[in-house]
Amino acid sequence: MSDSIERNAAEIARGVNSGAFSAAELTRSMLAHIDRTEPQVGAYLSVLHERAAATAARVDERIKQGERLPLAGVPLAVKDNMCLEGTRTTCGSKILEHWTSPYTATAVQRLLDAGCIPVGKANMDEFAMGSSCENSALGVTRNPYDLERVPGGSSGGSASAVAAFEAAIGMGSDTGGSIREPAAFCNLVGFKPTYGRVSRYGLIAFASSLDQIGPLTRTVEDAALAYDAMGGHDPMDATSIDRPFETTADGLRTDLRGVRVGIVREFATKELGPEIDALYAKAYRDLEALGAELVEVALPTAEYGLATYYLIAPAECSSNLARFDGVRYGLRVEGANVHEMYERTRAAGFGPEVKRRILIGTYALSSGYYDAYYVRAQKARTLIAQDFAKAFASCDLIAAPAASSPAFTFNAKSDPYSMYLMDYYTIPMSLAGLPALSVPCGWVTPPGGASPMPMGLQLTAPLFAERALLSAAHAYERATGHAAAQRPVIAMEATQ
């Protein structure tokens, strides 16, 4: 494998901007690598050979004209629930399998403007509903560190692409943990900004009050560069927050002196097993060794996060997915009348998990149950946000697990409840709209004696404190170096 495609986004941008190599050269190497590895990994639903080559040529021309682009020539994997004009945008669903985007999402366009090269549309759990990427109706995506294990979800394709060196930045969307969990499973940095900090225009909605776009990368610096490029107010998105945008890549630090880190009393890790418990205990000590002061904080309503989320998110999905009826978008299955056409289209187009969540949401919103379920869930959400505000009165950041286990084998969590529990540690932050990320924090041996698999440390900051969050994660990453402990199977096979 060419060393050039293993470079991080920051290294690629420096090389292209300086003329050490061209965006076109790197793109050719990347596409050749994708063609070799995709039969094993399955990260992409569409590989954009012609689009990538044409974009790379335009980036090289901009460089020749004297521009310096923050992400010049950086290969980009776009999660397939984000619109990119002229490409399929499927959401991993049969109902949109052949739908072509007529426009480009704001966050995607901003990364392209910064110099990124779109090399493919990445696989995902159908309509972003899942924690393993097993719910895609259009393909199987594997974890590059163990091809018998899942990459995490719902942004599993983006995570696998970056981990397998098939992209340097992956775009993900996070509703209840769908960036942070696959980052933990695939030895990456996965960053969910404050809700409303990155435009959702052009993101096909799952749960509109929770969905947020963010990057998956191999380093914190790359995540900061991607966030700085894609973030900021967008008048095309009614939920986009109009307030001054603070850049992050220019503020990364190497220590945590003066930083108070909260350890959540209710997020005990002993029940996760002795090896995982020891791993997180070591991660917290490493934060302390970098100069942080560890303080205990309480999130007494966090235990209600799972139940709260699985009322609010399905209710919003029930409403959002009503538009896929065979009339306006995608698949249409004819029937004897319009009602039969609706039923046949949605029965054929949606998979089991999507149907399950639509039914839950429709029930929660139905007459006689709206107040009992949906309204009470929204009240619980407010209490969770208030608990975070109280916790941040005594700390600057909160440290917690990003996932309760390493990546598991396919079909290991076939019942919905055990799968939903995978998001236990990430959902409360999403309900509160807080910025949070996962950064590699070590390796554990999964059941069955397989090779060690990565785990992630979740760091959370108050609203709009992205700069402090990424800065602290960078210090931890630089001091510990966990990500470099093991190479993905794909990379090792390519160098043999």
Image (cartoon, rainbow, N blue to C red):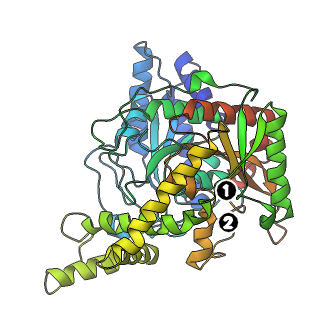
Mark 1 touching mark 2, by CB under 8 A? Answer: yes
Which of the 4 image quadrants contains residue 300? Answer: bottom right
Q: Is residue 480 visible?
A: no
Above or below: residue 347 compared with residue 492: below
**Which quarter of the image is occupied by the N terminus?**
top right
Residue linked to disc 2:
149
Residue 9 location, x and y as percent? 58, 32
Which of the 4 image quadrants contains residue 111? Answer: top left
Left/right placement of residue 273 relative to residue 81 reads right
Residue 188 location, x and y as percent? 65, 46
Residue closest to the far top = 66
What is the count of numbered marks? 2
Left/right placement of residue 108 relative to residue 215 reads left
Residue 415 location, x and y as percent? 59, 80
Bin the neighbour count of mark 2 within 10 Å (Cα to Cα): few under 14, some 14-19, many 20 and up. many
The amino acid type, in three-letter code, at marker 1 is Phe
Q: Secondary structure at mark 1?
A: helix
Bin the neighbour count of mark 1 within 10 Å (Cα to Cα): few under 14, some 14-19, many 20 and up. many
Residue 355 location, x and y as percent? 40, 76
The amino acid type, in three-letter code, at marker 2 is Arg
For the residue pair 168 and 135, the one nearer the viewer reads as: 135
* Residue at left offset 56%, top offset 62%: 305
Above or below: residue 415 compared with residue 144: below
Residue closest to the far bottom = 336
Residue linked to disc 1:
185
For the residue pair 149 and 478, the one nearer the viewer reads as: 478
Left/right placement of residue 30 relative to residue 203 reads right
Q: In terms of sequence position, does the residue under pointer 1 or pointer 2 come before the other?
A: 2
